Image (tube, coloured by chain):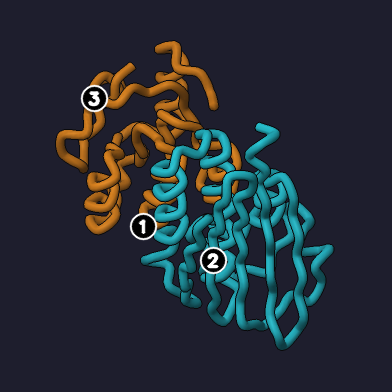
Amino acid sequence: MFSRVFPVQKGMFDTAGEASSKIKKILKKVGIPPDIVRDVAIAAYETELNLVIHSLGGELTLSVNPEIIELISQDVGPGINDVNMALKEGYSTAPDDVRDMGFGAGMGLPNVQRHCHEFQIASELGRGTTIRAKYFLKNN
Amino acid sequence: MLVSDLIKLIDAEEQTTGVLDQTIACGYTCDLLSWVMAKGKANCAWVTVQTHMNVVAVASLHDMACVVCPEGVRMEEASVAKAAQEGIAVLSSPKTAYDICALLHEAGVPSV
């Protein structure tokens, strides 16, 4: 069992994707099956970009044990106004300059849901958002 | 098809240097990064007008073969350097995204 924390800063587009890249490399190195590595990398990238675009800053935590991989995204705010809408494909609150870069397609959270075995999201305005994506290794 | 074959096929210039021996297994074109995150595959040739650093992050997470900028668009130098470091070729072609994909398809490269 090991756990690693990757801080992600608000608005840092130049380094966005670095945490996901590190997570992918770690999982490859410890011999996780390639399809799971790909799924975790996609979820990590989407949650990392959400932290960069929408949050006031936060972190990704990767925990690995022989049975389960868990990816947790936790931020310090501002929280999501309507979580059900945020989970809807095509819905986005990203500003225009971010959309010009190819983000804000409203695919982020649906992509995370599609690429994990168990998905949980909890958000409170003024406090922040926590997303948990779990991957079960024994059944794969 | 190798990246070196694609360069000839679409009259491209390689912005990275020496990343030519990757095999291209499929092709895709899209400028929305989350869309590409959802659909991308390993050894893909991805055609996009986006040129910033996050294009390289998406291509790298999918172990893509190359990123192709159409219509003479050139990728930013910092992104090219990062792509080279990740072993992903960056090509710039005078052809449109439509023509590049058509040529890939004619050459037997399937969609993702």
Q: Which residue is mark 1?
A: B53
Q: Is B67 on the left or on the right of A47, as rendered?
A: left
Three-letter residue code for mark 3: Asp
Q: Are marks 2 and 3 on the same chain?
A: no
Q: Is residue B63 left or right of residue A96?
A: left
Chain of the residue displaying label 1: B
Given residues B26 and B71, the one toward you in this image is B26
Of the pair B3 and B75, the residue shown nearer to us: B3
User: Is residue B8 visible in the rendered structure shown here?
Assistant: yes
Between the residue at mark 3 and the residue at mark 1, the CA separation in whole angstroms equals 23 Å
Crowd tier of the residue under label 2, counting other residues whose Cα lies within 10 Å: few below 14, some 14–19, many 20 or above:
many
Q: Residues within 10 Å of mark 3 (few under 14, many from 20)?
A: some
Question: Is B32 displayed left or right of B49 in the figure?
Answer: right
Position of the C terminus of chain A by quadrant: top right
Q: Residues within 10 Å of mark 1 (few under 14, many from 20)?
A: many
| Chain B shade | orange
Q: Which residue carries the number 2 mark?
A: A60
Name the residue rendered at 62%, 63% in the picture. Answer: A72
Residue for badge 3: B21
Is residue B32 something that shows in the picture?
no
Residue A134's spot in the image, x, y percent?
Answer: 67, 52
Query: Could you tell me the amino acid type at mark 1?
Result: Met
Determine contact: label 3, label 1, CB under 8 Å: no
